[in-house]
Image (cartoon, rainbow, N blue to C red):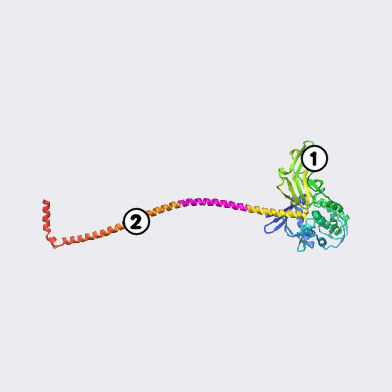
Amino acid sequence: MKILYTKYTRERLPQFQTETRIVDMGNSLIVQKKPLRNEGERHITEIFNNTKILSDVYRANILESKIQSNLLIYNYVKSESLSDILIKLLEKDNIEGFYNKLQEYKVFIENLQDIPPINFHSCESFIEVFGTELSLKAARVLNPANIDLVFDNILVKDNDYIIIDCEWVFNFNVPVLFIMYRAILSFWTKYCNFISVNVSLADIIRYFEISENLVDIFNDIERNFQSMVHGENRTDDQYRKIRYSLNSVVNLINETKYPVQVLLPVNGEYTYEKTIWTNYSQQFQVLQFNFNQEFDDHFRIDPIKQSAYIIIRSIYIIVSDSENGEKRIVLADESNDFLNISYNENIRRINRETKYFSCLTVGSNNHLFIKYTHEKNEQVKGENRQYKIFVEMSATTIHDTVVRELIMNMQLLEEKNATIAEKNEQICEQKSKIYSLNSDIISTLDKIKKQDKIITEKIVLHEKLQNELESQKNNLMQNKHEFELLKSEFIQLNDQLLDIKQKHFELQNSTSWKLTKPLRFIGSLIKRKM
């Protein structure tokens, strides 16, 4: 199992905070969504139930899910989103195709349910969630209403729309016009730096026949909804621009300044915020944010609300109060390699070898989290304590598509580097094995040499013994020859002896020998006497 992508929604209230990740299971990809806090388990269950309900009542493909121990699991669908298709049409300057696709989306939303147009009046549940009364004549509505049918949440596969997100569903009438307005604003907020070259926000809103009066009401509705999700007095959501009227939004986009925000968390919720508008520049600018409030073990910086190239030279804080005076603490710079900075998935750090924190931001939801450890003397409540946070940075805008292409190329490069690193590791392992084998071979060769020496000595000894054996064989042959000669001579002598014995026997048994026996006896007596 390998995690390919992770997204957190920590900026929300605890009960709505989630983690979404894409996981490679080896033979397939899946999407997992789980709560970040225990109080978010109910929200995950509601998303699962919403998916089942909408699958029954909407005339559309809803991405199915299953739930396992508070973990929502979806099959990963490899396909383009409606946002991707709209951007490609604008890349080709196909304005007509762009509006035709918007019209296709409008027809899709209006026909999700077979509910005829009604004179809409906001009910108590609507007002409780959205905080604003609304009345529309001959309005198409959805009930239950998935208000998050933004272009990013709709995949297009084989000309069919697939709804992949059922997080925000309400069981009361909601005008389709408001749902489409949210989709327009979400798309514009995220991609305005690119699409504004071809179309204007005002043109798109007019195309959907949304009056300026309705824009203001829809903005109030959206602001109240975001407060429900993120908490009161929170301005960290990705829809920040829709807090202005239509004209204000258009004017704001044309400005050369951008907002930098610092937010302080208290008990896990971002409660205090300061915003400074500064000029786009490649030169470093020092921004100072002053707070008088105590906060948790970190703070958040939203460096920009669009795609850009950001460089941070340093981040430091000056803490002062009547008891301890003033103290400057460096939180992030070249000296600590910016280790106190973490960031969400919309920020991509690059050029780590430089002495700056350089990164690319994608879209509007960009967060840096700066770790800050309060010193012991800060635990004592001094009077008039003040925190001055300084951010030294520069920003250059980049088209969103360019940033995405750069990040994609970086990811490909990182994957190639990872592959190369893996191959190098394998090569090192092979080298280590080769070195080990070489050592074994050398040891074996030494043993072979020793055995060769022993064998050589034994061969020499063998040859010596062989020579001695040959010599013994020769001596044996010679002795055998001599034996044969002696044997032959012995046989001859034996034959002669037998012949003599035979003659002696014949002599003793002859008549003459018998007749002369007295003579021989007398002769022997004479010899004795003599």
Q: 426 and 105: which one is in front?
A: 426
Q: Main secondary structure of the magenta part?
A: helix
* Kind of residue sitting beneath label 1: Gln
Dot 2: what SS? helix
Q: Which mark is residue 5?
A: none
Q: Which mark is residue 386?
A: 1
Disc 2 to disc 1, how far (Cα)? Answer: 118 Å
Q: Is residue 386 visible?
A: yes
Percent position of residue 270, x then y? 79, 47
Q: Is residue 223 visible?
A: no
Which residue in the protein does label 2 denote?
A: 474
Dot 1, how many residues are within 10 Å of its Cα: few (below 14), some (14-19), or many (20+)? some
* Kind of residue sitting beneath label 2: Asn
Task: Specify start and end residues of the magenta stretch as a single range.
Answer: 425-453
Percent position of residue 98, x then y? 81, 60
Q: 47 and 274: which one is in front?
A: 274
Residue 442 belongs to magenta span: yes
Percent position of residue 263, x then y? 79, 46
Number of residue marks = 2
